[in-house]
Image (cartoon, coloured by chain):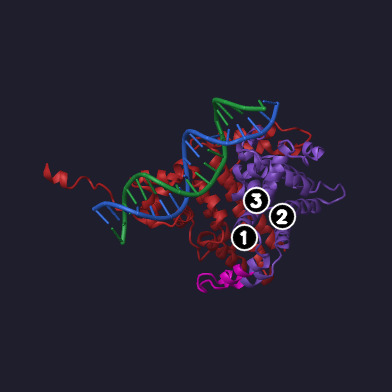
Chain colours: A red, B purple, C blue, D green
Amino acid sequence: MATRARRPERRQEPLSRERIVGAAVELLDTVGEGGLTFRALAERLTTGPGAIYWHVTGKAELLAAATEAVMATTVPPDDADATPQEAIRALALGVFDAIDAHPWVGAQLARASWQPPMLGVFERVGRQVQALGVPDRSQFTVASTLVNYVLGVAGQNAVVGETLQPDTDRTEFLGAVADAWAGLDAAAYPFTRAVAAQMRDHDDRAEFLAGIELILAGITAR
Amino acid sequence: MATRARRPERRQEPLSRERIVGAAVELLDTVGEGGLTFRALAERLTTGPGAIYWHVTGKAELLAAATEAVMATTVPPDDADATPQEAIRALALGVFDAIDAHPWVGAQLARASWQPPMLGVFERVGRQVQALGVPDRSQFTVASTLVNYVLGVAGQNAVVGETLQPDTDRTEFLGAVADAWAGLDAAAYPFTRAVAAQMRDHDDRAEFLAGIELILAGITAR
DNA sequence: ACCTGAACACCGTTCAAGT
DNA sequence: ACCTGAACACCGTTCAAGT
C-alpha cells in the first residue's frame, strides 16, 4: 500500500544527545566499559562514528553524561526529616546502588570526582557533617574521609564488574574468591585465610554500610 | 684505536625482565600512565616492541611488576615494637608515600587490589585489626574499610597525578582547585565553598592520616 | 634462546563532502 | 544544521624470520 510506503514505521528518530547517552548506557551495561566504542555506538544508532561528535565532544564527555544520567535516577534527594547520620547513610547507599547496578559508574565517579555527580555527593556529605556538629577545622577532613571511602568501594566494584562476565553469578564469584583465599600460603596469609569463609556468604551492600557506620562512630567518638 | 672498536663502551646490556620493568617505571614516572607504550619502551631499550614480549606477557603484567617494584622499596616492613595503631599508621603512610611519589601506582593498586602488593597490605592490616581485639565477626569489615579508604585516596592521587602536568607545582594546583570551589554557585554549594579556603594550604599526607585516625577512632568506639 | 620489525586488528578523532 | 564514512595517527599484540 502507498500509505505504508510513505510512512515506513519511523525509519530513524533523529540523533540527539539524549539518544546517544541512552545508547551509551545500554552498551556500557551490556558489554562493559571496554565495549563502549564510537564504532559500536554508531552501529547501534545506525549512523557513522563522526555523527556522534556533532552532539558530544568526545568519549570523556560521553562517559560523564552516562554517569550523570544513572546517578540522577538512582541517588535519592535529601529527606528533610532525616538525622544527619540517616542522611549520610541514605546518600552513601544511593551511590552504592548506582555502582552496584552499573559497575562502570564506579570507575567514572573515581575518575571525575570533582565533577557534578561526585562533587554534589561531597557537598551533601559535607552539610550533614556540619549538622553533626563537627568543628569547622575538621569538616573538610571528615567529609573527605567519607567520600574517599565511598570512592574506594566504587573503584573496587568497577574492577569486579569488569572482571566478571556479565552473566556470572555473584555468589559463584564470591565462592571463587573465598576458595582462592583459602588456598593461600598459611604462613604468609593467616588473616586472609581466616576471613575467607566470611567472604563466601557476604552481603556487599551491608558490608559497605558497616564501613560507613564505622566512620560515623569515629566522628561521634572524637 | 682497535681496542676501542672491539669494546665500544658496552653497546647494549642484554634485555631482561629487570631492565624492562626499570625502564617502565622511569617512563611511568616521567610521562605518566598514558606514556607507557610498548613502542616507547622499546625505543628506550633500543629494541623492537616484540622483544619485550619474550620477557613479559603483556601490559597488565608490566604494570603489576612496576607497581611491585615500587611498593617493595617504599612500604616499610612491620615493626615488632609498634602498637597495632602505630603499625596501621606506618603501613598506610607507606602506601601513601608510594602513590604520592608515583601516582600511577595508585591506579594500579586499585585495579589489582587482590594481587600481591595490595593483598599483602590487606593481610597486614587484618593482623593489626586482630591485635586490636576486634571480634572475629567484624575483622573482615574493619580491615576492608581501612583498605577501601586507602584505595579511594590512591585512586584520587592517580587522577590528580594524571591531570597534573609533571612540572606543575602542587601548591599552584591546590590554589586552582580552591579558586574553582570558591567560584561555585553559593546556593548549590555552600559547604564546598566554605571549605575551599582550607584546600589552599592543606597537607595531603596529614589529611590522609587524619582519615585513618578517624576510622581507628571508630574501631575503638565500637 | 633470544631478538627484530613488519603486519594485524583494533582504537578515538578529524574532516571534506554531502543533504 | 546535521550527517556520512573514509582517513589519520595512534594503540597492544602476534609472528615469521633472523641470529
Secondary structure mostly taken by the magenta-highlighted segment of the chain? helix
Q: What residue does disc 3 label?
A: B104
* Circle 3 chain: B
| Disc ID at residue B101 | 2
Q: Amino acid at mark 3?
A: Trp
* Circle 1 chain: B
In which quadrant of the rendered view does residue B44 lie?
Answer: top right
Crowding at mark 2 (Cα within 10 Å: few <14, some 14-19, many 20+): some
Q: Residue furthest left?
A: A2
Crowding at mark 3 (Cα within 10 Å: few <14, some 14-19, many 20+): many
Q: Which residues are magenta?
A: B175-195
In which quadrant of the rendered view does residue B17 lie?
Answer: top right
Left or right, A41 with respect to A176, comes to left
* Circle 2 chain: B
Query: In terms of sequence position, does the residue under pointer 2 or pointer 1 come before the other?
Result: 2
Left or right, B118 with respect to B9, comes to left
Crowding at mark 1 (Cα within 10 Å: few <14, some 14-19, many 20+): some
Query: In terms of sequence position, does the residue under pointer 1 or pointer 3 come before the other?
Result: 3
In the image, residue B185 lies in the stretch drawn in magenta: yes
Q: What residue does disc 1 label?
A: B164
